Image (spheres, rainbow, N blue to C red):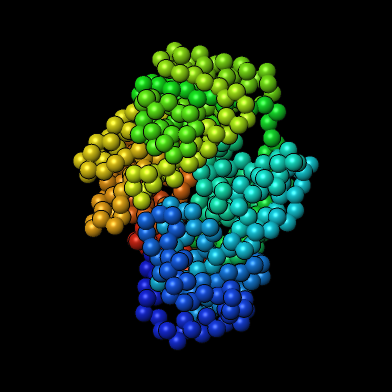
């Protein structure tokens, strides 16, 4: 009988000799410079950008699909778990090692294989950095639409793993909307192509299953991405309010008017102050909330859409409405938004970033409740939102060196996630589940839902070797029930 991912035993006790045999095989395959098993090397790869640490037996750095497939065959033959990792910018512990695992780091697979300007597609390696892809495409009038705050270092493979979003995914959609196909390696080392450039391919959408699966179904080694044409005109606006309530009402009215901006971001007062002190982007530090709105398209259209946003904002008591006068000012405003997480270092060395989705109509209630939770735990809280699509990012700033502080922050953050769920929201908009939100999944999904997801996982990976212990909580897989 095969074991499901839930029941996979810990491999912490696997013999050192067994590990060393796999290390030797990997070194023969890749060369000793692309296999790391020294304790210091393993420590370097122990974390992503979240708070959880992992434990791998060996790190492998393949450079081709064939090498990934062979690494996975070696690991599978030894019964060792396999965890795919990109640049380590994940925030939910989805790409950290598990005991006795082979950590497959894909950052060296960073080739852009083919660009089709007419079809607006490109085949890229999973290690291609998100922003570098758009930079390469700039003179071709194209870009890759998903733009997470970490896009200067995040990889396309990582974007695929968590179905990453970003400020400009409001109108364009998250990563799933920009991946047409992919070459993947299954748990037993088989290379399979899912999806492709042809529109509406027949059969099941296995591509859609793999995007956002956090490396639990297969490992992507080549990705066919959809590219987006650069717009002829862009208008970026900064809109200030005395508080969250007016800003939220403005967001709701903009969307209900039928206008879907390219981006509609919100920062609360504490976050405004932190960002302005850090970047000096010209944000009004006296404001209780600001919106960063952007519309793109033909100049006639952007002028009309910007006018509508101004009208709605004024009607909701905006204290300032400012339009970026040139590209330099626009870039600076976005630099401020994307530097928000780095800005936290002014007040504390660590942060825990939540990633829930709430109905826009419940923003104010949930914000008030998250502040009450932070106050009750004695924590500093700052808020940032992909406001247009309800993606809510309460951020707790703290010092992990204080005994018990990380545990307190996680407990408080779980309460914040529960508040979002109670308001009709869900656990993640773009960062994934990993280990840090895994045990909250039962609050969003019924036992039958979790069982269905576990069955899908089992169909791809019967032995549960791909990223075990992530995403689905223990006990998700239920035994078949007798028919009546």
Q: Quadrant of residue 406?
A: bottom left
In percent of the image, x 29 and y 31: which residue is there? 368
Q: State the residue lying farthest toward the left.
A: 376
Q: Which residue occupies the foreground of this view, 305 or 338?
A: 338
Residue 470 visible in the picture: yes
For this view, does 436 lie left or right of residue 226? left
Q: Is residue 359 left or right of residue 149?
A: left
> What x and y, as percent, mark residue 157?
58, 55
Residue at 43% of width from left, 17% of height from top?
Answer: 318
The answer to whether residue 165 is visible is no
In this rendering, position of residue 313 left or right of residue 227 = left
- The residue that appears at 52% across and 63% down in the rendered structure is 84
Q: Image height check: is 350 above or below 70?
A: above
User: How far from the left and from the top, in percent, is residue 291?
Assistant: 46, 27
Q: Quick one: which residue is furthest to the bottom in this view?
A: 17
Is residue 372 placed above or below 121 in the rendered structure?
Answer: above
**x and y percentages locating residue 297 in the rendered image:** 66, 26
Q: Is residue 162 left or right of residue 205?
A: left
Q: Residue at x 53, y 38 (%)?
A: 335
The count of marks equals 0
Image location of residue 302, percent across then percent down:
63, 21
């Amino acid at each position: 009988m095969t074991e499901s991912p839930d029941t996979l035993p810990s491999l912490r006790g696997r013999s050192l000799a067994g590990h060393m045999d796999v290390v030797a095989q990997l070194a023969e395959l890749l060369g000793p410079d692309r296999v790391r098993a020294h304790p210091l090397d393993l420590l370097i790869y122990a974390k992503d950008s979240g708070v959880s640490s992992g434990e791998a037996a060996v790190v492998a750095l393949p450079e081709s699909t064939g090498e990934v497939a062979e690494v996975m065959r070696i690991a599978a033959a030894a019964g060792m778990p396999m965890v795919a990792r990109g640049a380590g910018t994940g925030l939910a512990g989805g790409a950290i090692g598990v005991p006795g695992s082979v950590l497959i780091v894909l950052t060296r697979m960073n080739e852009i294989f083919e660009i089709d300007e007419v079809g607006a597609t490109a085949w890229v390696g999973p290690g291609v950095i998100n922003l570098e892809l758009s930079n390469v495409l700039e003179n071709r009038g194209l870009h890759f639409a998903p733009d997470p705050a970490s896009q200067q270092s995040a990889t396309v493979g990582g974007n695929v793993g968590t179905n990453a979003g970003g400020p400009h995914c409001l109108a364009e959609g998250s990563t799933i909307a920009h991946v047409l196909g992919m070459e993947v390696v299954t748990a037993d080392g088989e290379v399979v192509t899912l999806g492709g450039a042809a529109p509406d391919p027949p059969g099941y959408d296995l591509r859609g299953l793999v995007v956002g699966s956090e490396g639990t179904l297969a490992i992507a080694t080549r990705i066919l991405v959809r590219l987006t044409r650069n717009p002829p005109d862009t208008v970026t606006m900064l809109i200030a309010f005395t508080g969250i309530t007016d800003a939220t009402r403005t967001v709701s009215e903009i969307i209900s008017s039928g206008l879907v901006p390219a981006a509609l971001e919100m920062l609360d007062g504490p976050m405004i102050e932190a960002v302005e002190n850090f970047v000096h982007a010209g944000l009004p530090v006296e404001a209780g909330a600001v919106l960063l709105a952007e519309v793109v398209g033909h100049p006639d259209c952007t002028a009309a859409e910007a006018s509508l946003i101004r009208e709605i904002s004024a009607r909701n008591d905006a204290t300032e409405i400012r339009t970026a006068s040139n590209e330099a000012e626009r870039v600076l405003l976005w630099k401020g938004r994307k530097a928000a997480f780095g800005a936290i270092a002014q007040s504390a060395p660590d942060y825990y970033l939540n990633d829930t989705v709430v109905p826009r109509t419940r923003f104010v209630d949930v914000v008030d409740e998250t502040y009450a939770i932070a106050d009750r735990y004695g924590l500093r809280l700052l808020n940032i939102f992909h406001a247009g699509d309800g993606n809510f990012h309460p951020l707790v700033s703290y010092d992990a060196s204080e005994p018990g502080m990380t545990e307190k922050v996680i407990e408080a953050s779980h309460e914040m996630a529960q508040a979002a769920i109670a308001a009709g929201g869900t656990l993640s908009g773009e960062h994934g589940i990993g280990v840090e939100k895994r045990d909250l999944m039962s609050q969003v999904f019924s036992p039958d839902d979790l069982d269905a997801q576990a069955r899908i996982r089992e169909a791809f990976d019967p032995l549960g070797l791909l990223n075990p212990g992530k995403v689905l909580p223990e006990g998700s897989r239920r035994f078949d029930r007798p028919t009546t």
